[in-house]
Amino acid sequence: MSIEIEVMYSDFSRQRVPLEQVQNLRNDGVLFIIASANDTIRPRLNGRRRTQEKFGKDWYYLRNEAGLLEIGGWDLQDYKQIRIDDPWGSKLYASQPLWLSGGSVVFEGGHIPDEKWSEALRVFYAEMH
């Protein structure tokens, strides 16, 4: 079964690649990221169906390790770190979850005005499978 990764960017352009070529995707300005697979039972557009999806995050990651695929996301206030010598002082925020392996791909989220977000959602639900 072939897994493909599709990304929609803040200019509404899209890229789709096989999982093995995920390093070829542009990794900034991301609004949506999905994984899809062929589906003969409940196929959607192009005979494929989403298996994982993330959207509306400041950052995303795709981890493909030991035969498992994970797409996750986080916002700028997630993954708080404290200083060991001053645990009650100012907080730091990690640029990525600390548990990501070296083989993970990190994508920076894109931002669009609220009035364009509803159009982006419409395209996502209608066309990205």
Image: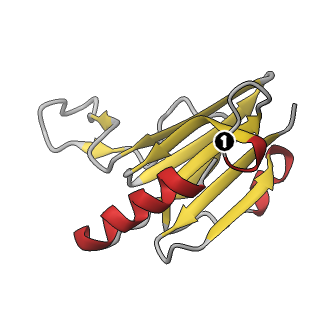
Q: Residue 56 at x, y = what percent?
A: 37, 52
Q: Neighbour class for label 1 at 10 Å: few (<14), some, many (≥20)? A: some
Residue at x 35%, y 36% (from the top left corner): 79
Foreground residue, 58 or 51? 51
Q: Residue 111 at x, y = what percent?
A: 36, 68
Number of marks present in the image shown: 1
**Residue 104 visible within the image:** no
Q: What's under tag 1, amino acid-wise?
A: Arg
Query: Is 117 above or below relative to 100?
Result: below
The quadrant in which the N terminus is found is top right
Foreground residue, 113 or 58? 113
Residue at x 59%, y 74% (from the top left corner): 13
Give the residue furthest to the left: 88
Q: Residue 78 at x, y = what percent?
A: 31, 39
Foreground residue, 92 or 1? 1
Query: Is 117 above or below relative to 34?
Result: below
Does dot 1 land on a helix, a strand or a loop? loop
Query: Is 83 above or below relative to 117?
Result: above
Residue at x 66%, y 42% (from the top left corner): 44
| Coloration of the structure image | secondary structure
Q: Is residue 56 left or right of residue 66?
A: left
Residue at x 28%, y 29% (from the top left corner): 84
Give the residue furthest to the bottom: 11
**Residue 34 visible within the image:** yes
Q: Residue 88 at x, y = what percent?
A: 12, 32
Name the residue beneath numbered marker 1: 44
Q: Is residue 48 left or right of residue 122?
A: right
Query: Is 98 above or below relative to 124?
Result: above
